[in-house]
């Protein structure tokens, strides 16, 4: 995986971030912020143990992004170019939307054992995906996993119960990450980006059936 995000601000600033899918190495002796430590606002469902792991993998991964944008306004316009091995994407949008996209792929590839369930989607990353696209991709990836499970003589979950449970866990992780960075962000860009990501996960865990009805209507060509 090799995804590059370039943010061009209206004042001429350029900021780049690269996502490789590899967990960042922490140099020995480097001082890390308190909010990155595992026990700081640790997720209630986190399987990691304080005595074995020092830092939250997801928090460590998003740390450079949070630091870079912690004083920025969420609704300012930015030109964002996303480049991967296959193609480039460009959009003039709010910093909030572009950060939601970047934070999402970074968290999914961070090494967090809960967010790791999103890694298959991250490998086919779609920048700036809206809620409908997120639901379509989530359901599509999950159903493909169930097909492979059936072929391996495992019980498939065609009713998507596991998908709902997965996104309920994702909501808990996102809430905990929001609490972690709340105190260090003077601007609202990171916070609103995480809230937006939380809302998209909610669309799968809380209102999946209504989302599926919307998709069904659109596949039939209805308004």
Image: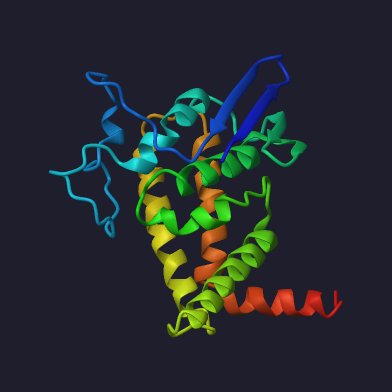
Q: Residue 113's image quarter?
A: bottom left
Q: Residue 32's image quarter?
A: top left
Residue 211 at least partly seen:
yes
- Which of 24 and 212 lies nearest the eye of the viewer? 24
Q: Give the residue drawn at x 78%, y 79%.
A: 217
Q: Is residue 88 left or right of residue 104?
A: right
Q: Give the residue drawn at x 48%, y 77%.
A: 149
Colour scheme of the rendered structure: rainbow
**Residue 120: percent from the left, percent from the top?**
53, 57
Residue found at the very far left of the displayed protein: 51
**Residue 14: percent from the left, percent from the top?**
65, 18
**Residue 83: percent from the left, percent from the top?**
69, 35
| Number of disc labels | 0
Q: Which quadrant holds the N terminus?
A: top right
Residue 182 at least partly seen:
no
**200 versus 57 height, above or below:** below
Q: Give the residue drawn at x 46%, y 79%.
A: 152
Q: Which quadrant holds the C terminus?
A: bottom right
Q: Give the residue drawn at x 31%, y 26%.
A: 26
**153 versus 191 height, above or below:** below
Residue found at the very far top of the displayed protein: 12
**Residue 190: percent from the left, percent from the top?**
51, 36
**222 versus 55 height, above or below:** below
């Amino acid at each position: 995986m090799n995804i590059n995000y370039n943010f061009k601000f209206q004042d001429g600033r350029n900021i780049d971030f690269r996502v490789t899918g590899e967990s960042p190495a922490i140099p020995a002796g480097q001082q890390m912020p308190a909010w990155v430590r595992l026990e700081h606002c640790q997720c209630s469902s986190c399987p990691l143990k304080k005595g074995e792991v020092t830092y939250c993998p997801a928090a460590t991964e998003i740390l450079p992004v949070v630091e870079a944008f912690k004083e920025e306004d969420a609704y300012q316009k930015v030109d964002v170019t996303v480049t991967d091995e296959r193609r480039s994407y460009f959009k003039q949008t709010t910093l909030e939307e572009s950060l939601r996209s970047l934070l999402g792929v970074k968290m999914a590839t961070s090494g967090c054992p809960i967010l790791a369930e999103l890694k298959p989607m991250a490998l086919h990353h779609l920048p700036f995906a809206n809620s409908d696209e997120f639901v379509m991709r989530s359901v599509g990836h999950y159903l493909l996993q169930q097909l492979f499970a059936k072929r391996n003589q495992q019980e498939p979950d065609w009713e998507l119960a596991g998908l709902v449970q997965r996104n309920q866990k994702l909501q808990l992780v996102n809430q905990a990450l929001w609490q972690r960075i709340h105190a260090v962000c003077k601007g609202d860009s990171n916070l609103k980006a995480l809230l937006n990501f939380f809302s998209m996960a909610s669309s799968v865990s809380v209102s999946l059936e209504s989302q599926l009805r919307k998709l069904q209507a659109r596949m039939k060509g209805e308004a």
